[in-house]
Image (spheres, rainbow, N blue to C red):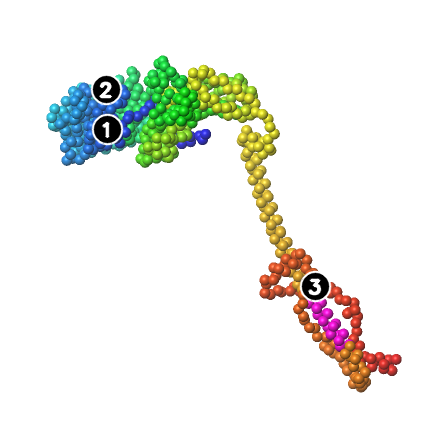
Amino acid sequence: MKVAIGTALALAFLLVLPVAHAGSSEISFIGVTSTYEVDGSHAVAIDGDSVYLASGYQDHVIIMDLENQSVVATIDVDRTVETLEFSHQGQFLAIALSGSQIDSDTIQIYDLHTMSLTEKQSTANAFPKSIAWSPDDNLLAVPNPNNGVDLLRISDMEIERSLTGGHNTDVSCIDFTSNGGHILTGDNSGRIVMWNADGSSTNKQWEMNSEVASCSFDPTDTRVASLTVGGQLNTMSFAGGALQNAIFEGGSSMSWSSNGAYIHFIEQGTSPVIRSLDASTFNVVESTFMAHDSTDLSYQENQVGLIEKAFVSTDTQHLAIYGHHGLPYGHGEAGADLDGDQIPDTLDDDDDGDAISDVWDNYCQNTGNVEDCARLPQEDRIHNVEFNINATHFTITDRIYLDIGLSSAIRNLSRIALVDDLQLSQDETDLFAQSICANTAHELKIQQWSDAITLSEGQLSNGDMICNVHNGMTLTAQNDFKSHIGFEYIITFNMSTPPSYPMLISVDDQPVATDGSLAHLAEMHPIAMSVDARNAEPTPWVLWWNIDGALELQLQPEIEEKKPLPMTVLGIFIDYPILFVPVLGLFLAFAIGALRTKNSMGMDLDIFDEEDEADADELDDEDQREQETDAFDEEPLEEDEGIEMERESTQTISKPRPESTPRTVSSEEQRPVARRRSRKTSTNKDGPITSVKRKRLDGKSEVTPPKRTTRKKVVSKPPVRKTRRVVTHADKVDEDSPSER
């Protein structure tokens, strides 16, 4: 599988903080609230008695039972909910809506005893970011349009008194001391002011680097904490002195633990994280990584003040729930259990163990035999484990699938993490992968597998683990109810000795989901087991039910067969990839040399071809001239024969020429007149090259013959034609002359 590079990069951003970071809180995503009819969750609150959970959306307020998140009441509102706060006694819920200065119902009060809105309403700041109840629940502090704070009487929602003069911008946070004697306020400019309860100044104020997101007193009223939108976290003494400070990527929704030992807040940045800091040292004690945007946080604590369960608003139709995974409902009870997950089928939402809820699962119905179906789950939807063995490493790919409903909810949460659109980007998928891996107890899971596996030869050591998402996230549509999210843990061990076959692999215990692992939400049984080992025979797929006990896998040596040379070489490269580099270099050098040689030969051939063409042209022209010469030589000879016969026939009637006037025959007269006749010769003297070249020359209008001096011409003529002599009448007279006798 491809290594999750985006996950490593995202984790690197978290390492630049100036405080010491602890590992995972070992709590992780465990589900969402079921509020599909609304959208845009902006605020969340839990009442003091931990009975109710309230969430504010764009046009609704949902009140749920905290234990099971069932909806208790739905309140319709006509504007977006900015914030909400339960009264200390748990009777009222104050709702702050976005609006304008002329709106008369910006603040609304809901009575939890009657489950209805009261007539008590009030105007406040157009966008009240914070409201606070006095310890006795008689007053509600809300920002006013004049850069101050109004203290409203709950009895009639009239202003009791106002805090003015301390701020120049809108107030963004408000808090009371536990005894109600002092009030803390912060504004958009970064100023924090401490007031006396009667509205007078204490002359204590602090300046921060950006808008104050949260400010509060500790439970003992001895310290003050503030968190800015820019990520500046500070604590100050009640007397005014600075105590601790740190800088994070961003911040929102800060509060003290009930015992004052920790500060919990949301770090807004590249990767949203719930941070828990030691209030004295500012060391990060716990971190819970999230794969989505987060705007507000409310939580339940354990006995030491750390977060046990957190509810986070996400700007979607859901609240995201984070916490420790407990045993599922019905675990360990008696009854028929076909999938072996220790949950009776009557209480099991997935009784065939194929990671698909029975509501959505039609696989059994298609087989026609329900009993057989229960024992034959869909391989690509159940827990898959693959062992990969080579000469040096033993790798475990532990692949887990989530059901359709949960997959859709996670995609809905994650799709707004970076860009609010309908599909998930690769970056958002990587963010989800990071949240899976970062919240898992790595060492525990590695040790779990190391203890479970026994080899007939050799031992496993130095385990390392990475996490990855391989299905159901990237480019998946918002309302997709078909794609299962699949993620995997890849654990790699070193092998003490190279494997030899036959080899026995014993797996004594099935893996279980570790703390902080999202695998708690998936079906862990059965497991589809497979092995891929080099030089070993393929191992058939094995379905491993947890009721079957330990699993033994016998690996047999691969049947040796003569492999083709290319396959042998390929196997060597796979086993020893370092050899690929020099071989590749040699191959490239050979290829470059061959290419250069080819180009050089091509140039030489072109030169030779040009010379051959010139020679062929010369030969062709010479042949043509030879033919013309032959015709020239033949024609005069025929004419000479006619002249001789004519002269012989007229000798008897011609008178001899007088000696005094002998006739001189000029060279021009001696040369016969050649008559050029175009005729096709019966014999073709052209060779193969000349024939081809002649065809090429046919299209040329002019042919420049080569110089005669360049080639020696040999003309063959019949011997008789070369020695033949024409005897004239004058010659005979001369022969008969007495002087010559």
Residue type for callout 3: Ser
Measuring from the top left, give residue 340's x and y in whole percent. 40, 17
Residue type for callout 2: Val
| Disc 2/disc 3 C-alpha distance (Å) | 122 Å
| Disc 1/disc 2 C-alpha distance (Å) | 17 Å
Res 288 quadrant in image: top left
Magenta stretch, residue numbers = 628-644
Res 23 quadrant in image: top left
Which residue is rendered at x = 40% and y = 27% of the image?
A: 366
* Precedes in sequence: disc 1 or disc 2: 2
Tell me the crowding category of disc 2: few under 14, some 14 to 19, or many 20 or more residues within 10 angstroms, Cα based. few
Contact check, label 1 and label 2, Cβ < 8 Å: no
Name the residue carrying label 3: 682
Name the residue carrying label 2: 51
Which mark, residue 56?
1
Dominant secondary structure, magenta: helix
